[in-house]
Image (cartoon, rainbow, N blue to C red):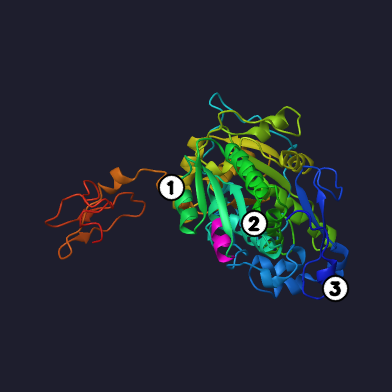
Amino acid sequence: MTKDNSSSSCRNNSCSSSYMTHLECSRCSHIEDCNNPLLVRYDLERVAKLLTKEMISSREASLWRYRELLPLQDMAYKVSMGEGMSPLWKVNSSSSYPSSSLHSEAPRANANGGSYNNNNSDGSIVSSSSSYLNMTSLWIKDESQMPTGTFKSRGSSVAISRAKELGLKTVCLPSNGNAGGAWACYGARARMNVVLAIPKDATCMAKEEAMIYGASVYLVDGMITDCGRIINDYVKRENRAGGTSFEVSTLKEPYRVEGKKTMGYEIAEQLGWQFPDAIVYPTGGGVGIIAIYKAFQELLDLGWVHSPMPKFISIQSNGCSPLKKAFDNGQDRCEVFENASTIAVGMRVPKSFGDFMIIDICKKTNGGFLTVSDTEILNMYKEFPRREGAFLCLEGAAAMVGVEKALECNMIGCNDRVICINTGTGLKTPTIFNHSSIINQLPILDKKFGSIDIINDGGDTNKINNNNNNSSNGCHGSSNGNGHNGHGHQ
């Protein structure tokens, strides 16, 4: 899957729309495999002559509108569920600050780049819960509306399509949850076998989703790095025995990046073919940062965008921050972060295979790294839906806390145009809070005589006139095992 270095034969037969030319080492740029992540390269000079931004805008609203800049040689192998073109929406601003238009230019922050010392004794600073409202141009790139509920749909669509084109029958990977579900989903659509190794403490949703799509799921008593080692060992043994399995761990194949980079294309297109001032990204393995930066660099090379490259700000959990630690120590490679722990499991990656690329991107764009605590993540996860009507995933909540911290330490400015990436839906972890005690306090209205009293503006408590019915809602003490005792659907 990583050895195909030319698309010329297929292009000459006019069966392809891709202008992929070769794969190259991400570290030395040689056209060979140096045991570093491989990146796809394209004939951008030819693309610039034959393709225009106006042509892109008239196409289907999916990531495949950028097909010339994707690696699939024959579109007959495309495996798609309409992924891509996720919304870019503006976070509500304080009424005391004027709103800026989508295409306006915002001044850049005057902060120096790098890693900021934002840690109190508990490893974090507590941000003002409303500080982000003072920003005039803060936007959410909302990946919650992808087919599998996360941005992982992008990488899975493109990588599975390319795997199918190359004749692969079985793909194997470790996952903390969302990637496994997405690969299982698109694998099912492509009629491919998917083998997953998932940490045993991954969310129930992660395990169930992969199983529902028919993947072979194995739970591992360890971290995702342990899952990766087991997958690697399995693929080697299975292939020695005559099998045809292929490992598609993060950055162990080059095509997942290509799917995820379309977030970058879309951001630029949605901003009128301009870049923002900063990208704030929750980081585990870091493929999203690598991918968006790659997209922006390709757009600059095509001459489609003339804005400066934005700052890239990586947000990690203070319970798992190997990249920040490496950067603070002046290193371009990170060591395994021991005893990694965070409630945002997508960010629980003790060591990234593409660490040197992520550190380099944040450094050369004058960005940096920030850490957030689980308490801050949970508070944002709970509060943001009430503020904005959007249910962020835990990683997206972490990124939003990161925005607040970046503002506090002058990494970004109030008038900067900042894009915060919400990588998925909060519905992936609906049981992160135990609301049963609150639900049990909700009154049940009598279906004939119950009424709701008028609530004054700003009221926080429902006043219920529940004639002849003062019981609790019956969600506790359920005898049927589904959280209801007969009253739950009234």
| Crowd tier of the residue under label 2, counting other residues whose Cα lies within 10 Å: few below 14, some 14–19, many 20 or above | many
Q: Main secondary structure of the magenta part?
A: helix
Give the side of residue 459 with respect to residue 201, left or right: left
List x then y, in percent, for residue 189.
56, 65
Q: Which image quadrant for residue 41?
A: bottom right
Q: Are marks 2 and 3 in contact (CB under 8 Å)?
A: no
- Residue matched to label 3: 12
Asked whether the viewer can see residue 94, the reply is no
Secondary structure type for disc 1 = helix
Look at 60% across and 62% down and name the residue there.
Answer: 86
Task: Kindly identify which numbered label has been placed on residue 155.
Answer: 2
Q: Which of marks 3 and 1 is in front?
A: 3
Look at 72% across and 66% down and name the residue there.
Answer: 66
Q: Are marks 1 and 2 in contact (CB under 8 Å)?
A: no
Depth order, front residue of 184/120: 184
Q: Does the magenta portion include 186?
A: yes
Q: Distance between the residues labelled 1 and 2?
A: 23 Å
Residue furthest front in the image: 241
Counting the numbered discs, the total is 3
Vertical arrangement, residue 179 with respect to residue 78, above or below: above
Question: Which is more N-terminal, label 3 or label 2?
Answer: 3
Please report the bounds of the magenta region as a residue range. Answer: 184-190
Question: Which is more N-terminal, label 2 or label 1?
Answer: 2
- Residue matched to label 1: 204
Secondary structure type for disc 3 = helix
Depth order, front residue of 163/298: 163
Vertical arrangement, residue 224 with respect to residue 469, above or below: above
Q: Distance between the residues labelled 3 and 1?
A: 48 Å
Asked whether the viewer can see residue 236, the reply is yes
Which amino acid, mark 3? Asn
